[in-house]
Amino acid sequence: MKKVIAITAALALAPTFAAAESFQEAFEMNRAMHGKNHVFEWNGNKYNTNHEEEVEAAVKATKANALDLIAKAKAKNKEAAEVGFEWKLTGGIIKDAEKAVEAGEYRKALDLAAQAKYHSRMGIQQHAYAQKHWHLSVPQ
Amino acid sequence: MKIIKKLALGLGVAAAAQMAQAADSGFDLKTVDPEADRIALQNYFKSRFPQAEVSDYVNGIYAVDADSREQWEELEEFPPYEFAVEEGEVLFNTPFANGKGYADCFENGGVGIRQNYPYWSKEEGTVKTLEMEINECREANGEKPLKWAKGDIAKISAYMAWTSRDKEINIEIPADDPRAKAAYLDGKKFFYAKRGQLNLSCANCHVQGSNIRIRADLPSPQLGHTSHFPVFRSKWGELGTLHRRYKGCHKDSRSKPLSHQVEVYRNLEYFQSYMNNGLVINGPGARK
């Protein structure tokens, strides 16, 4: 009896141990646990928990840089809309970023543009996930 | 010991077979089977809410939550959509400037036909909804199309639904046109795909989450959706079309909603209405 339980437990837990933690998993876990600007180690190398958009926003707060990031956010949001996965608030965040530029608040504009671009990237990622996994919600 | 081993092996094989079936059945054009989907959905709700009659699902959450039903039955004593149906009848029977009317555009003079909508049009290669054809009728007779969400279009649609009450929903997916099944599959996929900042699918609330509180609301079961549209919602204080509700739901997941009557919403309506085959039209309805 004990043998059976041990074998069953080993079989059930095997995939958990066998699957190595991917970079994505490690990044997401560390981001969730520590927020941005945290350094973590993965496969012997050190990485930080900043999203790529936060890295893009970490430039000198100038009008040109803000407008550049807003343009990138708009382009990414267009991609999300084209696959039908645009998020509700993204357009408004981009408008707020544009208003911040007009007001000369370039740091605020950069941060808002980064947020909008992140939303758009997540929408696109969500679409890709849905293409592969939508059937998991179907009752069998 | 041998018995336990055999039992464990048996369960493992059964689970694996079920998982394999779930993984490759009904999710592409080759394997999708609308009738199997309809039966599976009914069985799901029979098992979730064994006390509810399948035929009662046209009443939404009121089929499965007794307290909500009590309030709704009181509301139905003086139905809030009654005046709108009367206005819809007047609008329906008012001739266009060219002397023709809505009755000239629809089968059976537009009376008792709601149960056949939406349908697949082979000629146009698309799903046609009742509201779409109301506006096409107007345009064909030199009138301006109505706005989609509410107002006159909802009233005319409500009157047409009223004349179809108790008729069995009968959505067909023509076997000789694979595009029809593709449209159904597209609607099914939309229903089950997670979207928006809240990462919610329609199914998260209306299948797995039905009758489970979201703040103060109880989401209705998917089975029976569409039968009572257009609907008078207390929240709106007026009648609204099904696509108005789709946009609202879509927005609730923090997605940017799509336009009324866009192809994927019509496909969603096609899928959802097919799920209701055999139930009856009870529109217009009243909801919170």
Image (cartoon, coloured by chain):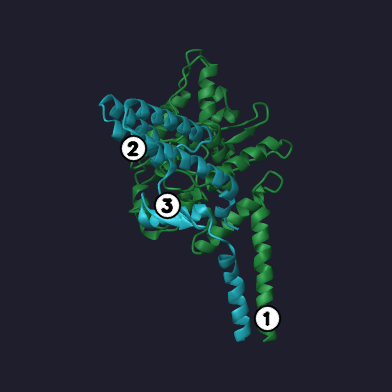
Residue B240 in the figure: left or right of residue B2: left
Task: Check disc 1 and report the residue beneath it.
Answer: B5
Regarding mark 1 in the picture, which secondary structure is present there?
helix
Q: Identify which residue, B220 or A125, lies in the foreground.
A: A125
- Callouts 2 and 3 close, C-beta under 8 Å: no
Q: Identify which residue, B64 or B99, lies in the foreground.
A: B64
Dot 2 and dot 3 within a common chain = no
**In this rendering, is residue A124 above or below B16?**
above
Chain shown in green: B
Q: Amino acid at mark 2?
A: Asp
How far from the left and from the top, in percent, is residue B106? 58, 27
Label 1 neighbour load within 10 Å: few <14, some 14-19, many 20+: few
The tag on residue A10 is none
Label 3 neighbour load within 10 Å: few <14, some 14-19, many 20+: some
* Any part of residue B209 in sight: no
Label 3, label 1: how far apart the Cα atoms are? 43 Å
Q: Amino acid at mark 3?
A: Pro
The tag on residue B219 is 3
**Nearer the camera: disc 3 or disc 1:** 1
Label 2 neighbour load within 10 Å: few <14, some 14-19, many 20+: many
Task: Check disc 2 and report the residue beneath it.
Answer: A111
Label 1, label 2: how far apart the Cα atoms are? 59 Å
The answer to which of marks 3 and 1 sits earlier in the sequence is 1
